[in-house]
Image (cartoon, grey):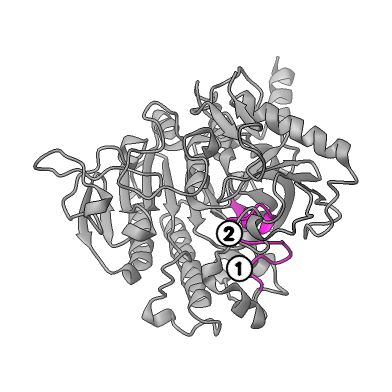
Amino acid sequence: MKNCLFLFLVVFGALPAFAEKPNIVYIICDDLGYGDVHCLAPETCKISTPHIDKLASQGMVFTDAHGGSSVCTPTRYGIMTGRYAWRTSLQRGVVTGFAPNLIAEDRPTVPGLLQDQGYTTGIVGKWHLNFQYVDPETGKAYLRKKYKKPPVGAVIPDGPTQRGFDYFHGFHHARDMEAVTENDRVIEHDEVVNMLPRLTRKASEWIDSRAGDGEPFFLYVPLGSPHTPIVPSEQWKGKSGLGDYGDFVMQTDHAVGEITAAIERNGFADNTLVIFTSDNGCSKAAGIPKLAAQGHVVSAHLRGSKADLWDGGHRIPFIVRWPGKVAAGSQNDSLICLTDLLATTCEILGADLPPGGGEDSVSFLPALSGDPIRSTRNGVIHHSFSGHFAYRHGKWKLLLAKASGGWSMPNEAKAPADAPIAQLYDMEADIGEQNNLYASKPEVAAQLLKLLEEDVRRGRSTQGDPASNDVSEIILWKSKNKKANAKKNP
């Protein structure tokens, strides 16, 4: 009996590592390109990012991580729900606030799951998933067409604190950045240049407030930078030598340093899983050609940028630090998606995926130990600003678009008249997506298209009972006849 017990402890010695629920801090930048992090592209990144680089040296870099979309809102929906946003009414673009929350009230979320597991949950930053502003006197919703910005005192009936968070401090999105929100109301108006310093301070203070609490915590920090408005604080202007964008990236890196410093000074580092990432690629608003002329390449070795189907639109920095669980200075080439946080969190806690949730979420927990990801998902679905689809399966990537499918040139309107209706790339041999094999590999293209169609039709891309999309019609071929190519739920 003693020998059996000894064998059990030896074989399963790693299991107690997860016995104590880890704190989770998830930092996501806004429009930070893969090439904007120095350690990820040292030859072409001319911006100093010492704090992010340090995080990478202490943990694991994923080289093939992707947002659920190449723009803001859909990616954030996927992070919170483990589900692609195109399964909702949002078939293209982003939301603009002053509207009901995109996350249905009964849909499981990462913070909601963690609350059920005894976690204290907080969000400091940009929500960008819609919520309403209500007049506290009349109970009527304020309308965008009447208000340039939400009034101070406006009440939010369907914000983050109604979707699993105990605390919220931040703003909805860039257009409403002046309206500072705390929990369920607008508390003040402030200049946009003050938002990044505010979020840096508030995130650090919230971590400080957990000291001595005894409960595990989840802090979601969706920064609004270096997205527009590109407004580095006075003390950061001129630091990069590349203009305001470079300066703003450096200030964003400083914010990461302040947050990780708060984790460390409170003695949380050894039991805190820190994830650092971005929602999509760098925006053209950064002045990409000018930066390139100065030697800085925002997407590094990737083609395209924010809004595109090409990988520069949605392949993003992804760094995980977890002392004692993740080897320092390690790298992982597994294909993952930002929808995967929900399933990963469940596996860490030994919990099942909640019913009716996580349809597109796969746990990457095994990868943190260097093991293969046990995926029930055939591939990862990419989605552009204009709603064009792409499918990644192994080394192959199929794009249902003639060109970028987004903002980079050529876009769909500027694609050559004789361009093939789709693109197929071998991402191992051609990561820059230059050699279109769609015409020469029709059998591969057909296989990927079939997988994509099936993932759309079933309402999920992972193994499990068929689910339902929120809309009856999802059009895969945006550049062809819509009616002929509409995909409907069974």
Q: Which residue is mark 1?
A: 36
Residue at image point 66% right, 49% down: 65
Of residues 225 and 271, which is closer to you in this image? Answer: 225
Q: Residues within 10 Å of mark 2 (few under 14, many from 20)?
A: many
Q: Secondary structure at mark 2?
A: loop
Q: Residue extending furthest left? A: 137
- Is residue 304 found inside the magenta-colored segment of the image? yes
Q: Which mark is residue 293?
A: none
Q: Say which amino acid is labelled 2.
A: Lys
Which residues fall within the magenta stretch?
Answer: 297-322
Q: Which residue is mark 2?
A: 306
**Quadrant of residue 358 in the image?**
top right
Q: Earlier in the sequence, mark 1 or mark 2?
A: 1
How many C-alpha atoms fall within 10 Å of the one at disc 1: few (<14), some, or many (≥20)? many
Residue 374 appears anywhere in the view? no
Mark 1 residue type: Asp
Q: Is residue 59 above or below residue 162?
A: below
Task: Name the residue at the top extreme.
Answer: 1
* Mark 1, secondary structure of its residue: helix
- The residues tagged by marks 1 and 2 sit, at their Cα atoms, a distance apart of 13 Å
